[in-house]
Structures are given as C-alpha cells and as structure tokens.
Amino acid sequence: MRRIRGAPNDEGAVLLLVLLVLLVFGIILGALFTNANGSERSTPFVRANMANVYAADAGIDAGLQRLRQNSEFCATKNNGVAYTETFSKLANGHDVKVTCNVTSSATSLLGAAGYAAVVLSNDADSLTQFRSGTPVITGPTFLSGLDPSKLQNPIQVKTGNVDHLCTTGGQNPIAQDAKIVIDTANGYEWNPDCSTTPVVPHILPPEPCASSSVGACDVLLNYQGVETASCRIFAPGTYTTAPALSNTKLNYFASGVYHFKGIGGWQIKSDSVVAGREQGQDALCSTNLIDEPTITIGTTSVNTANNGYGATFVFSGDSYINTDSNASLTINARLPQSGTPSWTQRLSIVALEDLTGNAGWATSSITTDIIDPQLGNTPAADVRGVVYAPKATLTVDPNNTAVEKFTGGLFVNKLHIGNTTNAIGLVIGATPVFGDRTVTLTSTSQPTAGEKPVTAVAVVTVSTTSGFPTVVNSWHNNPPDFCSTVSPPPSYCS
C-alpha cells in the first residue's frame, strides 16, 4: 500500500500521547505518594493529640461532677489557693489535672468554705462525742486530728466527704475509724489531704461605733436597749459592757454588725434573743413589720432600715456567750439588702485569730467555749450563719426537747458533741444560701509519650439549689501544635 505524502505519522502521535499521559500521572502519583508519606508520619501525632483532647474534656466532665456532688469543691473566691485535683488514668491512659477557681464576686454561699464543720486542732480531744446516741453532721467535714477513743459513740457524716490532714511532714494520713460513719453508698469518701487547710473568708466591714466615734455611737458603748410593748431593741454597734437583756420581752438585735469588746461572759439566762431578721421575712419589733425599727437614743435616731438581713456578733478580748437554763438564742445569717458587699456574707459568730483583712478590729483570747452551754440545763441555740472561731471550742449538748442548730457551717479549733437519745434538736450542717457562683474549670492532660499536653477550659455557673446544678457558659480546647513537639519537626510541618 502506498503512503500518501504529507499524511500524519499515526504511530508517532500515539506514542507521544502515551508519553504525555504517563508524565502527567507520574507527577500526580508523586505528589500523592509524598502526601501519603506525610499523612502516614503525622497519624501518630494526630492520634496522640486526639487522645489528649478526649482526656482533657474528660477532666472537665469530672470537674462538673465534683461541683454537683461536693459543696466544698470550689466553694468561694476567698478560699486561698485554687482547688486542684489530679485524676489518675482518667481517659486513654492519661493522668489529668483539674483546677477550679471562683471568678464571680460572690463570697461564701456554702457553709465554712463549703464545709459543714472544720475542726483545726490535732489534739486528742479535737473531736469528742460524750453521750449516748449517734449525732449527725450533714455536709462535708474537715478534721486535722482524730482520736477514736474520744468518741463514745459513732458520728455519722451525711452528704459529704470527710477530708483530713496528714501528720507532721505530710506523711501518715489519719486512719479511718468505724466511729466516723461515711455515706459511701452515695459516693462520699474518707479523703486524705496532706497539704491544704480550708481558708474561710471572714472579712468584716469597718468596726461599728468605735470608742473614738461621736454621737449615737458613743451612747452605744453602754447602750442597754430601747423598749416597746413586747420587745427590748438593740442597735448595731460596739458594746464594752454586756447588753442587759429582758427576761419578759423578746430581745431583738436589729440587723447589722455587733462588736462585743472585752465584756467577759455575756449571760443569757431565761432570756429570748433574736439577732437580725431572716431573709425574705418581716422584721420583728417594728411598727410596719417590714423595715427594721428606727431606734431613738437620746436625741439621735439610728435608722437600721437598710441594714439588710441577719446579724454578725464579733467577740474580741475575753468576750463570749454564757447560756444558761431556758435561754434561747437565734442568729440569722448576715446578708445585704441587695448587691454584693465588700464584707463576707453569712457570718454569725466571729472571734478573730488575726487581723488579716480586718484592720481596726481586735482579736479574741478565748480558747475555751465561745458559747458556754451550761451542760445539764436546757438552753436553745439556732445559729444560721457561719461560726468562725479558729482558736475556740464549740460544745453542743442539747437534752430533752432543747434545740441546738448550727446550720451555717462551723470553723472551730475543737468540736465537742453530746447527744442524748431523747434529744430531738441537734443539727450540725451547712444550709446553702440560694444564689449562683461562676467558676472556671481548667483541665490539662498529662503526656504519656512526649507529646504536647492539651488544656480544656470551661466557664460554669453553679447554683446552690438542690443538687448544685451547673450551666456551662463556654468550653474550649487549646489549638494543637505538633510541629513544636519534636526536633527535627516532621516533614509535613514545612
């Protein structure tokens, strides 16, 4: 067959086309192989990061559970150092460190730094139980020492852990004893803490009516009350002599702060004392039952209408309360009328150990009972705010139908409990004030193979209503950064 001059060379064209296709695919495959190699080499780092992310998020979940379960966890902004806990092998084999900080301005809304009772002394008699019956502490309890032989009968702790310090040098934690009965069925435990003692906030407003003041405050230094048909009314201020109580009328201490300065034992015998109005309730001894009474001293009126709720009794020097038969004492938790004050809310009884944050006040010298109960008689006490007396002892020993309630949280050196089987009114616990606090949870996963740790941060609103419900406002992780993890960096980092 004869080829026509000028016709294209079909074989050459096909060959050229094949070579072009191979070149293109070669370039593509080369890029794919390069990327595949980079992806293959980066896979362990991606997996390690994801394992860290999951572990950090698991730490946030664990922190949320702590907030719902334990009222002492991140209870108050003024609680010293931030709460930190390390969860061993929490997720994907990673240890996770969780730190919690209160970031809102609210002060203590939950007992004594979240505890129902904090006992500071490590002496043998720091905690005693000396009668029949099984007393109950409702809420977390902190012990610095424990000698079970001082407990005639068991003490039951409900709805809270029992935390305790280790011995000197941070070794040998206190051994759990059968006489401290813990609510383990609901997840509470005996928990050693070898480093931290709770710090209860106790910031007071300026001392009221100091001796250098003028006007009505000077009169209050020896003020003995103004009387109505049914009440003897006392105004907030500084008292250098014990208030003279009426045993035929209600003794009402209008809402505010009272400083009992070197008055010795203030005897309350066959007297009924109520300090401050209860939040949400009408005021006592007032003509309109809404506002606190306006008290006239000489020619000066002391208007306590905007003093908020409850009362704070501050004892300095040798001052203490000496209750006796048929006495009745009620102190409502101290709260502002509105807003957030600069002073600590909910303090009912204060005996300062030092003056940190409380310049102008005075310390207490009492190391025995801050409320001497006169054992064998039937005094009644209902203290609804925090008892802060770190050098003093509190003895509670109701009998028969007497009521002794301490529901705001205790912070004392020693706690002595007598509880006869026929006593119906012994209550030690921490009743929260309804409100919200904002906390920040920070969770950091710990590396297992040299990879970079991941930190998760959540901002959470915690309510003091039943179950301490939480609302997560934000939750994020720090961005991964594999390229700074190893040297030299992987090829895919360039």
Image (cartoon, rainbow, N blue to C red):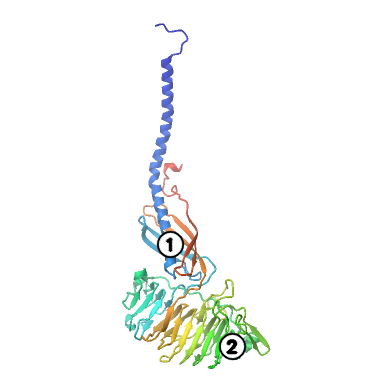
Q: SS class of the residue under badge 1?
A: strand
- From the image, state whether disc 2 or disc 1 is nearer to you: 2
Tell me which label, 2 or 1, sits earlier in the chain: 1
Quarter holding residue 54: bottom left
Front residue of 468 and 484: 468
Which of the image's four quarters has the N terminus?
Answer: top left
Image-based side of 427 in relation to 209, left or right: left
Residue matched to label 1: 98
Quarter holding residue 305: bottom right
- Percent across and percent down for residue 127 are 38, 81
- Percent across and percent down for residue 360 are 57, 80
Q: Residues within 10 Å of mark 1 (few under 14, many from 20)?
A: many
Can residue 270 be seen in the rendering of this structure?
A: yes
Look at label 1 and name its amino acid: Val
Front residue of 107 and 164: 107
Quarter holding residue 254: bottom right
- Percent across and percent down for residue 88 are 36, 61
Residue matched to label 2: 233
- Percent across and percent down for residue 248 are 54, 93
Look at label 2 and name its amino acid: Ile
Which residue is rendered at x = 57% and y = 75% of the image?
Answer: 336
